[in-house]
Amino acid sequence: MENNQPVHAREWTTAMPTPNNRRIIHLDMDAFYASVEILDNPALRGLPVVVGGNSNRGVVCAASYEARKFGVHSALPIHTARKLCPQGVFLPVRMARYQEISRRIMEIFLRYTPLVEPLSLDEAFLDVTGSLRLMGTAEDIAIQIRGLVRETTGLTVSAGVGGSKLVAKIASDLNKPDGLTIVPPGREEEFLAPLPIGRLWGVGRTTREALALIGVKTIGDLRRISPTILTAKFGKGGMLMYNSARGIDLRPVEPSQEAKSIGHEETFSEDLRDTKRIDQELLALCCKVGKRVRDKGLTGRTITIKVKYRDFVQVTRSLTLAEPVGGDDKSLYQTGRLLLAKTEIGLRPIRLLGISLANLAPAGACGQLTLFGENRPREKECRLYQAIDTISDRYGNGSIVPATLVEKREEG
């Protein structure tokens, strides 16, 4: 039997049982990127570590708990983080290393259930309902997983156990780092009641302010508001809040979700205004995206570019094609240029540029189709890309690039 008290310790009165018999675990690595850096360099232990760049460009990707004490958090501009924490150790992102560790962690999760839904490299939902007869309670499974992750990787992971994704996610957030919070069946409403309303998914600042006007500050306050009032005030979102306040969330854990898009973006070391240089950067991005699309054997129909100006104002422009395009760098680049022409490129300095391909599907003949409706295989280009990819795989990405990018390298 699972313990009737949550690990973060709170006395609750008996609640009516819920018909929901699912047991969901939400697992969230603690300050993952920063923790990997500390694992690889123990001299960093106890120091405020910030991952996201060693210049004043870009944003924070992760911050150790020591850095968070200074107000540093994810998505904070690096230059702001440096002001808040001048003694911080600022490190560049090492994505390949984080992906390597993430794969090992996900393999551990899959030992306990095939129903693993990764949300990112460091976070996942597990539905262990079908594993209980063989492996013990959900609490037992969570304890075993946390121990194996620590033993295998040297890292800590926080876990929340509940009857829904909503409750499990909130539970895992309450006792970080290296925490375990159990919400027994039938205790969801009591668990949620004292928590601030902002803990619920989809309740941002504007919604919080609107709820405060009708006396709602905690999830328990929200539970006392009728669905009629909530629906009248917030539309469909009102009914979602009504159910969420009761711990009701019927969304299943969905394993092996395919990526909805493949993209790449770059924050530049200095703001760019020169259109020739921006064109070069766009082509470099298209080469990276094209390689990833080819590696996965996919095509897509929607191409999107993202531009962030010097003042952090961000715009996107998209085009959905009549026919899919595969990992054809040239096609991605041509469409990207059309979309860039619809922005203020050349008029306003930009700090970030990105391009992505969405509406993905398995590739057809030769792994790709032409851009503007020609469905015949392009054998010559296929062979060219296969040769390029072979060289890149052997000698590293960027070992073979378009001539215009050689000029960019020499200028850099």
Image (cartoon, rainbow, N blue to C red):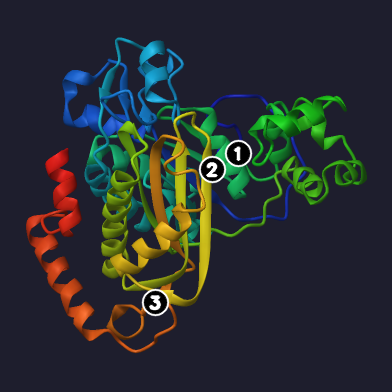
Instruction: Point out which mark residue 183 bears.
Output: 1
Please state which of residues 287 and 176 is positioned toward the viewer in this rendering.
287
Q: Give the foreground label among 2 and 3.
A: 3
Tell me the kind of residue under disc 3. Pro
Where, quadrant-wise, is the N terminus in this rendering? Answer: top right
Q: How many residues crowd mark 3 within 10 Å: few (<14), some (14–19), many (20+)?
A: few
Rounded to the nearest whole Å, what is the CA distance between mark 1 and mark 2? 6 Å
Q: Position of residue 278 (x, y in %)?
A: 33, 46
Classify residue 29 as left or right of residue 204: left
Q: Are marks 1 and 2 in contact (CB under 8 Å)?
A: yes
* Marked residue nearer the N-terminal end (1 or 2): 2
Instruction: Say which residue appears at 70% left-offset and 44% top-offset.
Output: 247
* Marked residue nearer the N-terminal end (2 or 3): 2
* Marked residue nearer the N-terminal end (1 or 3): 1
Instruction: Point out which mark residue 161 bears.
Output: 2
Tell me the kind of residue under disc 2. Val
Judged from the image, the secondary structure of the residue bearing numbered disc 2 is: strand
Rounded to the nearest whole Å, what is the CA distance between mark 2 and mark 3? 36 Å
Where, quadrant-wise, is the C terminus in this rendering? Answer: top left
Instruction: Say which residue appears at 54% left-offset and 58% top-offset.
Output: 253
Instruction: Point out which mark residue 241 bears.
Output: none
Q: Position of residue 53 (x, y in %)?
A: 29, 29
Q: Position of residue 73 (x, y in %)?
A: 44, 25
Tell me the kind of residue under disc 1. Val
